[in-house]
Image (cartoon, rainbow, N blue to C red):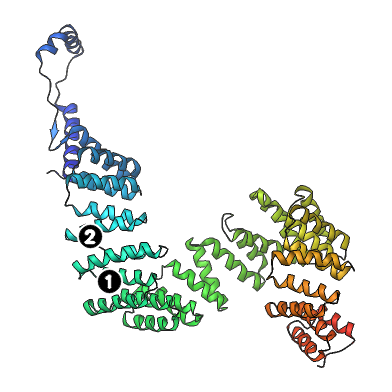
Amino acid sequence: MMKYRNFTLSIACLVLWQCTSTATDAPQETASEASDSASVVVADDQTAAETTPPEPEENYGNFTRDELETALLGEIGGMRGYMPQAAESYYHLGMETGDPGILGRALEFASAVGNARAMQEIANRWLEVEPNARNPHLVIGYQYIEQGQFIRAIPHLEQVLELGGDIDFALISARTFNLEDRQRNIIIERLTAIQSRYPEQTSLYLALAQLHDQSGKTESAQAQLDQARERFGDSPRILLIEAQILQNSDRNEEAESLLALGVERYPRHRLLRYSFAQLLVENSKLEAAAEQFDALMAARPGDVETLYSLALINLELERLTVAESQFRELIQARHRSDEAHYYLASILQDRGATDEALRHFGQINRQSNAWLSAQRQRLQLLVDEQRYQEASDTAGEIAEARPELAPVAANLQAQALISAQEYERAAVVLDQALAVAPENIDLLFTRARLNETLDDFPATEADLRAILSIQPDNAQALNHLGYSLTVRTDRYEEALTLIEQAITLMPDDPAIIDSLGWIQFKLGYLQDALVNLQRAYDAFPDPEVAAHLGEVLWSLGRQGEAMMIWQEGLDKDPDSEFIHDALERQEIELPL
């Protein structure tokens, strides 16, 4: 049977021969001869039709001329990079002719363009004309695996084995983590049956080990690995799966020791060393992880993903000069550029290289997850440098780039100004933004906090009540207003109602529990106050909570415990105004 590579060459030669014949061998007619010939044809048209026998359709091997030309066009299209057109041509030609050579080529093109539907149809057509072909079974099996139809894939993969091929069954177990145990058990049963018929297929042991491990059957998983070792000897793949089983059993230290042994035994196995490095990171052994990543980089200097991991570790270890160089290298290689710009800018910011930091923050793609955080950093940097006009321009750029983020940009700018104690500027930004978006919760919260800082309680209450008119079940607004009423007014019953609503919505929030304990103290419910403030302090030992808990303890006559709690708070924040106010109210001083 003619192979596609041969008939492509043949048709190419045929076309070239025809072109040559037309140009050089045809007799040269004069103008009058040409005219006479034409008149004869017209005059005797019917006679010619009656006497000239029809030309038989040319057939080249098993293909018509049209089919060969389609194949040629497909090949030329593939060589020129027109892959979708070439794939389409070969798909139709293969489905029409049923020729295995054409179908094989059609599969290659369909795979190259990622057309899974065409691949499956071509493979099925191939099996119609050649039932014992391995490749179509392989393709259909892998397609079912990609679609998550593992049970339908298994018979095709088994057929490949029966036809003398080889299969890596771990392709299945690598994708079955999220299956229900019932479905996974069916796969285990089918693969176990195949294993009994093909005991020399190494990957069956590895796949079954992973499947058993995913079902929580650690002993069965280990038994499969032990059988694999006994039959085939140790290997990096067996070590990797065994380490995975240990990790899934929360035996990370054992997994680490096993991978360390594996790296020593197979020092050139990249995946083994990479897994070891990742586990060291997970076990918080960053120095040792950096050594492994260094070894990976030495073996393959161009591996930019490993370089990224190493840069992050060096950043965490505060090896800032090394990390800076690595992030610059990543930017140069255009790999993870957004993240590299962000981390590099953060390093430069800490060093005081503000302009360069701003430039790198500004180069992050607006579609990146790091973009909004970068804009926050830009605004804060500009405000810290008292470059207020640039901060305003940056906020405008954010709003222009992403109009839906205009309130976010204004909020970021206001927060940066508040942190720089530029309260009047922050108020202008917030008032202007709320004039455009009056129901924006974040803007209302920021202005409420600003007004609280400015000791303007009526304005604070107005903004918090505006939030509650929009979102009556906003636990933060309920708590904030209730606590503000507690510390700034004597409207304690109203405060208690608001805080109780908040605690119903968020019963485990330490800030709300602290507010509840403090209003209970103000109302004289000392035991209830003690219980709640102790719970808040246990969850969040903040100096403000310490100040409240200490006052309740003091009021209950437990002065020693109160002083101990206040001292703990001052150890964390020696300048805490909350604790100093509590000490002043009790007219006491803590011993140095």
Q: Which residue is rendered at x = 79% and y = 87% of the image?
A: 562
Give 228 or 331, whichever is nearer the viewer. Answer: 228
Q: Is residue 166 left or right of residue 242?
A: left
Inspect the image, locate mark 2, and give the three-letter code of the amino acid beneath it. Answer: Glu
Asked whether residue 380 is in view, the answer is yes
Residue 423, given in percent of the width and then of the height, sits at: 82, 63
* Residue placed under numbered mark 2 in the picture: 158
When asked about the image quadrant of residue 577, the answer is bottom right
Inspect the image, locate mark 1, and give the three-letter code of the amino acid beneath it. Answer: Tyr
Element at label 2: helix
Point out the tag, 2 or 1, that comes first from the N-terminus.
2
* Residue placed under numbered mark 1 in the picture: 205
Asked whether residue 109 is in view, the answer is no
Q: Classify 55 as above or below 456.
A: above
Q: Quadrant of the N terminus?
A: top left
The residue most toward the top is: 43
Q: Which residue is rendered at x = 74% and y = 65% of the image?
A: 502
Q: Which numbered dot is residue 58? A: none
Give the number of callouts: 2
The residue most toward the bottom is: 591
Q: Quadrant of the C terminus?
A: bottom right
Residue 299, given in percent of the width and then of the height, sits at: 37, 74
Q: Classify 72 as above or below 357.
A: above
Q: Is residue 182 left or right of residue 365?
A: left
Q: Is residue 527 left or right of residue 205?
A: right
When asked about the image quadrant of residue 298, the answer is bottom left
Residue 493, given in percent of the width and then of the height, sits at: 85, 67
Element at label 1: helix
